[in-house]
Every structure is written in structure tokens, then in C-alpha cells.
Image (cartoon, grey):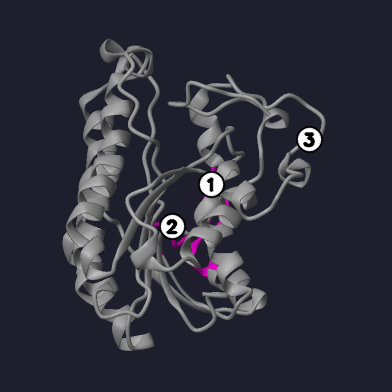
Amino acid sequence: MENLKGKTLFITGASRGIGLAVALKAAADGANIVVAAKTTQAQDNLPGTIFTAAEMIERAGGTALPLAVDIRDEQQIARAVETTVETFGGLDILVNNASAIYLAGTLQTPAKRFDLMNQVNVRGTFLVSQACLPHLLKAENPHILMFSPPLNLKPRWFKQHTAYTMAKYGMSLAALGLAAEFTDQGVAVNALWPKTVIQTAALAMLGGLVPPEQCRKPEIMAAAAYAVLCRRSRDYSGQFLIDEEVLREEGVTDFSSYAVAPGNPLFPDLFLDDFSL
């Protein structure tokens, strides 16, 4: 595929950050974007709502459908997918972007935080995928893309935040399983993860560990996601991908424009053992 013109994307958590960046990238092609997120009113600590995101998508050239969706609620998911299909006549792409993070040791992780991460990352990802699949199976070039890491079972990635690692890997396991189950039916299922920490609202959850000037912008993940979603679904599935590697395959060699502060050293993201720029 050359672009995403006329395609319908259902993006969870698309009111800000990486999800919004992906939406804007697709909107430039004239795609239909479902902004499936919780935020309907502006909050002091979180920028953006489903409505402000929709306005940005429309200005970028896309058609937006803002839907208030808490992916912990299966009825809200079902209604949102039904509304999507009624509005646009089908569904081509699902981007499982919504995620919850809490980086703490076992003794410092309250049950409500453990539950939230598993309800959003694992259960939510599975249920949204489940609801979208009947429609994706009818699409010409259907994709499911998870924003989750390669499965790395080295103990160091569990030691400091076992609960978060378990929950985030749940998304990756969903990608692995769904790819095995649906690739032969034409649905591509892949996972994409950043090589470096991305500057988003979630950065605050790192407790100041990573300065913003050592991060990249969400647009690098959007560019990599776009490249994946334009590929032929029957030929490209079951992959655990890194944003920079995807873009190198597309011929990109200069990544300085994606840096928050070009020239500063970049902080590697979690779950990646090898890091070189």
C-alpha cells in the first residue's frame, strides 16, 4: 500500500502522546480516525481530550470520530466498535496504544495499581482486539498493532517492577497469540516499541529518572507505525519491531529531527538489552 487514504483506524488512548501522533500521521493521508479514549474534559496534569484530538485530526486532513471509551468496560468497547462500523462502513486497522504504567517494586505496588495495569494492558488489549477482529477479517489489508515490547525474559527486566513487566508483556503475548491465530486469515498482528524513551505524559511516572532532553518525540513512533500499517498484511505479521529499525528499513538514516534536544545523549527504553546509536 502507498498510504492510508480512506482507511479507518481505531486507536485506543489517542487523545494525546503516541496515539495522537499516529492519528495525525494517518490523517495527513485522509484516513478516518476513531479517537477511543477516556478523557472528555481537560485536566491540569494531562493535556488533550478526545475532542481536541479530533479537531487536530480534522485540521491535518483526516475525518475524526471522538468516542469516550474506557477499555476496561467491554460494553463501551462494543458500542464504540459498532459506532465505528456504522459511521465508516468498516474497520481496517486497530492500534492498541492505551496502557497503564506503575514502576515500583513488589512491596510498593498497591493492589489497585496491579489491577489497573492488568485491566488496561492485558484485558483491555484483548477485549478491544476481540471486538474489532470480526470487522478486520472483512478488510482488504487489516492490521492490529500493539505498542508493547519484545518478550525479553532476562530477570533484570522484572527485578525493579515485576507487576508492570507482567502487565506490559501481556500485550506482547496477545500480539504473539493473535498473530499465530489470524495471520493465515489475512490479519497482520505486530508489536512496536521505541528504542529510546519517548516524551509523553507517562514520562512523569518515571519519577524524574529520564530528563525530557534525553528523549525522542512521539513522531518517531508514529512514523514507524505508519510504515508498518502500509505494508501488506499477509506478508508482514508476528513481528516484534523497534521504531528506529523499522525506519532504517524505510531508508531513514538521520533521526536528529525526532530528538527533543538534538545532540544530547538519548535514554534507552525498557526491555532492550543492546543500545547503540
Identify the amino acid type marked 3. Ala
Q: Residue 155 in the image: state x and y as whole percent.
A: 32, 13
The range drawn in magenta is 36-53
**Image height check: is 16 above or below 277?**
below
Q: Residue 166 in the image: state x and y as whole percent.
A: 26, 29
Q: Nearer the viewer, mark 3 or mark 2?
A: 3
Question: Where is mark 3, residue-wise?
Answer: 261
Label 3 – label 2 distance at C-alpha: 29 Å
State the quadrant of the C terminus: top right
Label 1 – label 2 distance at C-alpha: 9 Å
Residue at x-position 54% and y-position 72%:
54
Identify the amino acid type marked 2. Thr
Label 3 – label 1 distance at C-alpha: 22 Å
Question: Which of these two is toward me, 183 or 16?
Answer: 183
Among the 4 quarters of the image, the one containing residue 152:
top left
Identify the amino acid type marked 1. Leu
Q: Residue 17 in the image: state x and y as whole percent.
A: 55, 50
Q: Residue 162 in the image: state x and y as whole percent.
A: 29, 20
- Left or right for 197, reference 33: right
Question: Which of these two is toward me, 83 or 89?
Answer: 89
- Left or right for 135, reference 3: left
